[in-house]
Image: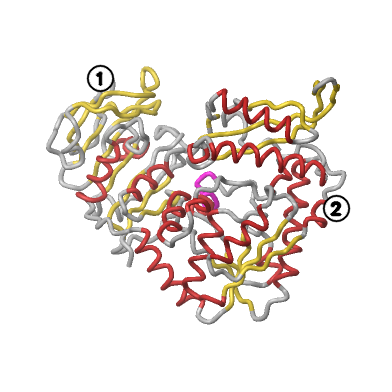
Amino acid sequence: MQEKILILDFGSQYTQLIARRVRELNVYCEIHPYNHYPEIDSSVRGVILSGSPSSVRDKEAPQVDLAGIKGRLPLLGVCYGAQYLAHHFGGEVAPSDSREYGRAMLSKVKGNDPLIASLGEQTQVWMAHGDTIVREPDGCEIIASTEDVRVAAFHIAGEQTWGIQFHPEVYHSTEGIKLLKHFVVDICGCRQDWTPASYIETTVHELRDKLGDDKVVLGLSGGVDSSVAAVLLHKAIGANLTCIFVDMGLLRKDEFSSVLDSYKNMGLNVIGVDAGDKFLGDLKGVTDPEQKRKIIGRDFIEVFDAEAQKLCDVRWLAQGTIYPDVIESVSVNGPSVTIKSHHNVGGLPEKMNLKIVEPLRLLFKDEVRRIGRELGLSDLLLGRHPFPGPGLGIRILGEVTKEKVRILQEADAIFINALRDAGWYDRVWQAGVMLLPVQSVGVMGDERTYESCVALRAVTSTDGMTADWVHLPYELLAKVSNDIINKVRGINRVVYDVSSKPPATIEWE
């Protein structure tokens, strides 16, 4: 049984980051809502209580039953979690005179405490709370303070229970990962054996047991998730896996042929379906972005289903679902409002009467890449930027036509290749070109033009939830602009998007 740390989620924006930091220590962990977590069995080595946008003083504040945890297992409360421990176990929490937010210097009060033993006498941490602990819980020892926060970290004597009013998971807490290691390794006793190699071995064994001799179909997108899922399944069941790769006519330039070639070189059984005419025909005259998404999603299901029906005795549909999707679906804040039906081949299980297998459902995106690298996938594929499920259909604002797709493919190829040539591609999380529904006047030679405008977009991010625009060199932007205008007929103006997410989104739609 895989040992693990449980993280009970109270709705903090940082909860996933706590999990990622724990996993960086090669320790497996799971996130569960505070009000719906699994039975505490022998595999659980410790529990972390997350932060929350709520106040423990509110009548509707999240309440958790810790009867089977506190005093029995190592327990760490982070921010709201620490205040919850104080509020419910003999302490007092009150509003701060001013919001405690940002960097602070943590000073040791009890330097030999196992949670903070190897941290510096002073170390930078990140605060983010409006309440503060004004009286520590019963039996508590204060182990660290800041200039403004007396009870910055505490330990309840006689049990392995700690609370900290700062966030060790964010990079602003310079020794945060060291503190988390003290908790999960030194205090909880986790072995740090959850590695890519061990995950592959365990998952392949489980897939063989689960699937037996059954046949499986998988929809490939050319992206990292579906590719790694395919290779894992192929390692487990070999020829019983059939992959379908649908060309919607909305892929990047030459992507259909190049992706098919790369899959065949990986030994996968892949069926390529050219359905561009169907998609473009059904999108004719449609300008609303949500309607375009629905049409693309519907057509994908129809094409995939028609191709899959030609296969005999298929019992399972494989999907590249990853852990953030799983967390989102059971979040304390409720399920996601928008289901990415195209990306996850939504609707197919009901239509095709297939069972679902999701070999990546326990992994974050960066872990998927680590697994892929261990499986021997190329860095070119693993380093591929995220690409929207509906493809260029949502990067063409307004009606989608074959000519607009051609224009955008050409411009996009110039931009992406320029990033690669200049050594910027791997420094950017996602990049692409948007074709705008406006035309502007230009002059090319002695000729007056009235042609389209495109916007270049390049962002940095970790998970796509937030993103900052990339400060690309002016020289690079100038070269890209010049090449696009000179080489792509139909474009006479190039702009660069300097909006961050939020308030903007990465895609324009």
Q: Indicate the quadrant where residue 137 lies.
A: top left
Location of mark 2 (residue): 281
Q: Tell me if 324 is positioned left or right of 102 in this view.
A: right
Q: Is residue 325 above or below residue 171?
A: below
Amino acid under label 2?
A: Gly
Distance Cα–Cα, label 2 vs label 1: 66 Å
Q: Look at the image and tell me in which quarter the N terminus lies.
A: bottom left
- Label 2: which secondary element: helix
Check if residue 21 falls in the magenta segment.
no
Circle 2 or circle 1, nearest the eye:
2
Q: How many marks?
A: 2
Magenta stretch in the rendered image: 328-333
Packing grade of label 1 (10 A; few <14, some 14-19, many >=20) is few
Packing grade of label 2 (10 A; few <14, some 14-19, many >=20) is few
Q: Tell me if 4 is positioned left or right of 392 in this view.
A: left
In the displayed orientation, state which residue is furthest to the front. 445
Q: Could you say which disc has been placed on residue 147 in the image?
A: 1
Amino acid under label 1?
A: Glu
Q: Is residue 64 above or below residue 86?
A: below
Check if residue 331 falls in the magenta segment.
yes
Q: Position of residue 417 (x, y in %)?
A: 60, 40
Q: Nearer the viewer, residue 39 or 396?
A: 396
Q: Position of residue 226 (x, y in %)?
A: 56, 59
Residue depicted at x 62% and y 34%: 505
Q: Position of residue 198 (x, y in %)?
A: 34, 64
Residue depicted at x 77% and y 44%: 406
Q: Is residue 109 above or below residue 367?
A: above
Return the disc, 2 or 1, that comes first in the chain's sequence.
1
